[in-house]
Amino acid sequence: MLPSEQRRFDYLYKQHLTNLSLQGKRPATVDGYARAVRRIANYYDCCPDNLSTNALKQYFAELIQTHSWSTVKLDRNGLQFFYRHVLNKEWQWLNIVKPPQVKTLPDILTPTEVALVISLTKQLRYQVMFLTLYSLGLRLGEAITLHVGDVDAKLMQVHVRNAKGGKDRFVPLPKRTLLALRYYWKTHRHP
């Protein structure tokens, strides 16, 4: 990039980061949207503020060939944010970059298979972790951040904090899971 072009890019990029934080975007979203602007700037070796629709189409056509659809969608959303909130331009061709609609069913273990996985696990802490993940329907990151105070034995529910999207939620606590957690607590007692 020419020095004047680099200065313009640096200014716009800083504005992009500022607008993302003012919109209250989560750190992972800020990182992805910022990467999208850097990636297209590196691709064309210029500031992306004056790219034509054809240049953007060419960029996304190549991006689809080299990256996953999740990356393509993240770049599309990041550039859309950049155009709308930094350049104050309308993003006219949002529907051009559309991932294919694939509906696949996830692999779901039967209760027998889950019981087998848990019973074949050697260490008690992993057995309790697998039981807790499965019975509460938690993501791994949600289970890792659970604390003893999040388990409410009276109301038979667990408070999952800062889950996906930064939201809190309550999930029902099965009696069997409560008993397993209590048994583990007696042997471990880590705060």
Image (cartoon, rainbow, N blue to C red):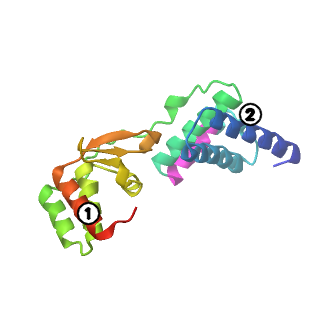
* Of residues 157 and 34, the one drawn nearer to the viewer in this rendering: 157
- Relative to 34, is 130 above or below? below
**How would you rate the neighbour count of disc 2 (Cα within 10 Å): few for under 14, some for 14-19, many for 20 or more?**
few
Give the side of residue 161 with respect to residue 67, left or right.
Answer: left
The mark tally for this picture is: 2
| Residue 66 in magenta stretch | yes
Query: The residue under label 1 is which amino acid type?
Result: Val
Query: Residue 171, located in which quarter of the rendered image?
Result: top left
| Residue 137 in magenta stretch | no
Query: Residue 154, located in which quarter of the rendered image?
Result: top left
- Relative to 50, is 146 above or below? below
Where are the magenta residues, as a range?
A: 56-67
The x, y position of residue 5, in whole percent, is: 83, 43
Label placed on residue 149 = none
Instruction: Kindly identify which residue carries mark 2.
Output: 50
Give the spatial CA distance, label 1 vs label 2: 56 Å
The x, y position of residue 98, in whole percent, is: 46, 36
